[in-house]
Image (tube, rainbow, N blue to C red):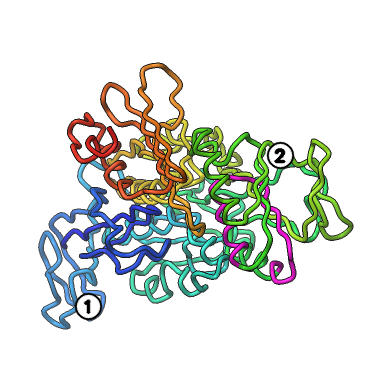
Amino acid sequence: MSETKRWTCEVCGYIHKGDAAPEQCPVCGVDADQFVMSEIEIFQPKAGAGKWKCNVCGYIHEGETPPSSCPVCSVPSEHFTALDAPVAEGSSGSARKLVIIGAGVAGLTAAETAVSAPGTEVVLISKEVQLPYYRLNLTRYLAGEVDAASLVMKSDDWFNEHNVKLVYGDVVHIDRDEKQVELRDGTRHSYDKLVISAGAHCFMPPIPGANREGVFTLRTQKDAEDIIAASKNAAHCVVIGGGLLGLEAAGALKKRGCNVTVLEGYGWLLPRQLPQKGGELLKDVLQQEDIHVVTSATTKELLGDEAVQGILLADGRTIETDMVVVSTGVRANSYLARQCGLTVGNAILVDDQLRTNDPDIYAAGDVCEHRGVLYGIWPASYLQGATAAANALGAEQSFVGIARSNRLKVLDVDLFSIGVINPDDASCVVYEHQDGNQYRRLITRDGVLKGAVLIGDTSFAGQIQEAIEANTALSNWPKLHQQFF
C-alpha cells in the first residue's frame, strides 16, 4: 500500500492527506499555494506472512501482503483484513481492540492511524453527540464565514467504510484492572490499549456574576450557536481575554454587527505570542478596525440582575454590555486520569511515546503534558494522536516536540508568531524593526533562528518556520538572511 502524502497549511497548521494539496484549506480558507508538503512520518503497519480475507466477497489470499486488488470482486487492497493480524516488529504486544476517548483532532487521527492496521477493532467515544468537527474553525463559523456542514471532519460513511465504531457517550470511569471504560449510561467497553484524547474545557475565573444570562465561553459548536443567537439582540459585547481565541471571537462578533470591547489583564495583547512592542502595535491595528481594547484590565464583577448588564473593573470603571464572552484559557480534562491513578501534572504526564504510567494507556492532544509542555495547537494534537495510536499498535515512534506557531484567523490582520519570543538569557540576539503597521522581530542563538514575530507582511512565515524546525545555521537560508539582515 502506497504512502499518502501529507500537506501542512502554513497559516493554521491543518494537515491534509492526499496526492495534492486541497484547493482551499477547510479550516482557515486559504488557497492551495499556502500548503507545503509535510515531512511528518505516520505509522504504516507491516504485515507478516499469513492469510488475508476480502471483506467484500470472502476470498482468501495467502502472502506477506494483500493483493493490489481482489481477483474475485476487484475491490482494492484496503478491503482485505489479515486473518492472523501480525504484531509489529519489536512489539511486546499491540492492540487488538483500541478504545479512544475523545473525538477531536487527536482522537480522530488516532482512529485514522489505527484502521491501517489489519485486524484492529477501533472504538471512538465522543462526548458531543455529533460527528467530529473542526474545533479550530469555530471562530470562522461564529463569523459566518463557514456553515455547519463545513465543520464536519468525517462523515458517517467514513466510519462505516473503515469499521470504526463511533460511540456517543460520556466516559465516567476507567477500570485499569479490568481494562474497561464505563459510560454514564452504565455501558462498558473493554480495551487492549486505550488512548485518552479527551481535550480540555474553558477556564472560568471565579468572577461574581459569571452565572448570569448572556455570559458565554467558546469551546464547542453549541457554544458558538448560543453566541450567534444571543448576538442578534446584543448591541455591545465584551470579550474578557486578549489571547488568540478571544481576539478571533471579537473579530467574529464585529462581523456580526456588534460593538466589541476586548479586556486583557496583561499590559499588552497576546502576551504569550508577542513582545510588548508587537502587542501594542496589534492593539492600535484593532482599534483602527473599530474594536476597542482595554489592557491592564482586571474584571471584578459582572453586573446585572438575571442577565448581564455591565462589567465592573478593579479600578472602579464600569462598562455597559449586553453580552460577555469569557476567553481566559483552558484546562485539561484530566479528571478521569486522576480518578484511575494515572500520573497527572497540569495534564496527563506522558513520555516520548505518549505512554502514561500505565503501559496500556496513552494520551494525546490537549489532555496531555509532554516534557512540561501543553501545546493546545492543531499540528501537535494531530502528531500526538497518530503517534499514540501507532505505539499502541506495536510501533516505537517518538514525539519529541514541535515549534509552537500561531496565526490569527477571522481578523483582517496578518500575524505570525513562532518559537522563542522573549529570550530569558543574554545568549540570544534580537533583531526588531517597525515601519507603520509592519513589524518584525527575529531571535537567533549562535547564528540559529529560534523565534520570530511578523505583523503585516507574513509572506516569509513558511520559510521562517522551516528554518526554525531545521535548527540549522541561518546562513543556510540565504533568502531569509538577505531579506531580514
Mark 2: which amino acid? Ala
What's the CA distance linking mark 1 and mark 2? 67 Å
Name the residue carrying label 1: 58
Q: Residue furthest bottom?
A: 73
In which quarter of the view is residue 155 placed?
Answer: bottom left
> Is residue 100 toward the left or the right of residue 168 in the image?
left
Q: Secondary structure at mark 1?
A: loop
Observer-nearest of 169 and 242:
242
Indicate whether residue 238 is drawn in magenta: yes
- Identify the residue shown where x is 49% and y is 58%: 412
Q: Secondary structure at mark 2?
A: loop
> Is residue 50 toward the left or the right of residue 305 in the image?
left
> Is residue 475 toward the left or the right of residue 170 in the image?
left
Mark nearer the N terminus (1 vs 2): 1
Indicate whether residue 106 is drawn in magenta: no
Name the residue carrying label 2: 297
Give the mark toward the camera: 1 or 2. Answer: 2
Q: Is residue 155 above or below residue 215?
A: below
- Image location (x, y in percent) of residue 21: 26, 63
The span shown in magenta is: 230-255
Q: Is residue 421 above or below residue 258?
A: above
- Image location (x, y in percent) of residue 205: 71, 42
